[in-house]
Amino acid sequence: MNKILENKYPYLTNFFETALKENRLFHSIIFYGSNCYSQYAIALELARKLNCLENGSNDCTCQNCRWIRENRHPAVMTVSKLDNKTDKSKTVISEEQINMVLDTMYNSSEFHRVFIFCDAQITDTKTNDYDEFISTGFNPPQGDEEKIWYPLGLNITCLSSVASNAMLKSLEEPHSGVTFIFLTNSKDDLLPTIVSRSQVFYVPDTKIYQYNTDFLNQPFHSYPYIPKEKAVDLAQYLLNYQLENNLEPAYILDSIQYYFTELIKSNINNQVMVNIIFRDIEKIQESKKMIKSYIKEQTVYEDLAFYLTKS
């Protein structure tokens, strides 16, 4: 896989390398997290590996690899409210667009078709996320020096239930040589019927934040085997630390998520442990949504602590 992505996401790239070699890549994939540019880069790298005419090496310059890096390959399509439009709407991915995708699938092709679904916007300002994306060697589907294409996470407004339901049959009975990839901030922003038919992967934001996670070493020293009777103590510890240090609950949850992401790196060869950590990171995402819904911090911490502890 792409060296930059390998360094940022070793678990994900190792997983997909193995899946590609063993020909067991799932037909529908969901990437979720806060950095949609990283999700988009991983999606394009998967498309490149699936269509490479040589051996899939990072420096391959075959026609397919060049076209995908330039974002002009006929079989790799970004589907957003701004991209590959078949109607005049600029606010949603329309049912008409979905039908266009489905019609495309029925045409024979020598390529492996990859459809990348996301929301998108055009901005005037380059961001660090954009610079990191460009450094991976890929180009966005549109934009120039003054106008920057920026991927956003899908939600039920952008990808409506009507549009989602239009593709369900293809997700249930997948065509060979076709992969769907959905980018979102949270899997809860997609219809459960899409989630249940997809493999779901958390793509952590690898920006460097000033998180001092030392305060988590003591309560999580026996993770992932924290006894259930410690749940209340764990929740109270997190609440007390927040109040004593005048912190926002979002900072506490972000710190735990960062702490767990670092645990992935130190357990990269332990797939069972990595799967547990990814599952628990998903729960932290749910806890963040609870906070945004104005649920009491203590309730959120207790819910999370009882999930993380074992009976």
Image (cartoon, helix red, strand yellow):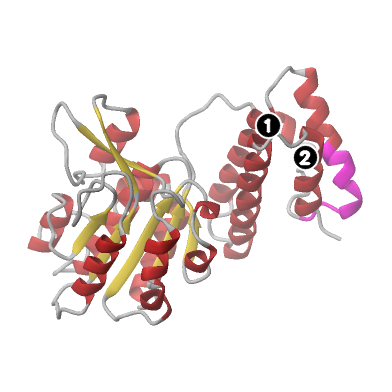
Quadrant where the C terminus is found in the figure: bottom right
Q: What type is the residue that disc 1 sits on?
A: Ile
Q: Residues within 10 Å of mark 1 (few under 14, many from 20)?
A: many
First to last magenta residue range: 225-235
Which numbered dot is residue 5? none
Pointer 1: what residue? 252
Of circles 2 and 1, the one toward us is 2
Pointer 2: what residue? 301
For this view, does 305 lie left or right of residue 134?
A: right
Q: Does the magenta segment cover residue 66?
A: no
**Chief SS of the magenta region:** helix
Q: Residues within 10 Å of mark 2 (few under 14, many from 20)?
A: many
* Nearer-the-camera pick, 279 or 62: 279
Q: Earlier in the sequence, mark 2 or mark 1?
A: 1
Residue 212 locus on image (x, y percent): 63, 26
Check if mark 2's residue and mark 1's residue have beta carbons within 8 Å.
yes
Q: For the residue labelled by badge 2, is the local secondary structure a helix, a strand or a loop?
A: helix
Residue 194 locus on image (x, y percent): 47, 66
Q: Residue at x 83, y 40 (%)?
A: 234
Q: What type is the residue that disc 2 sits on?
A: Tyr
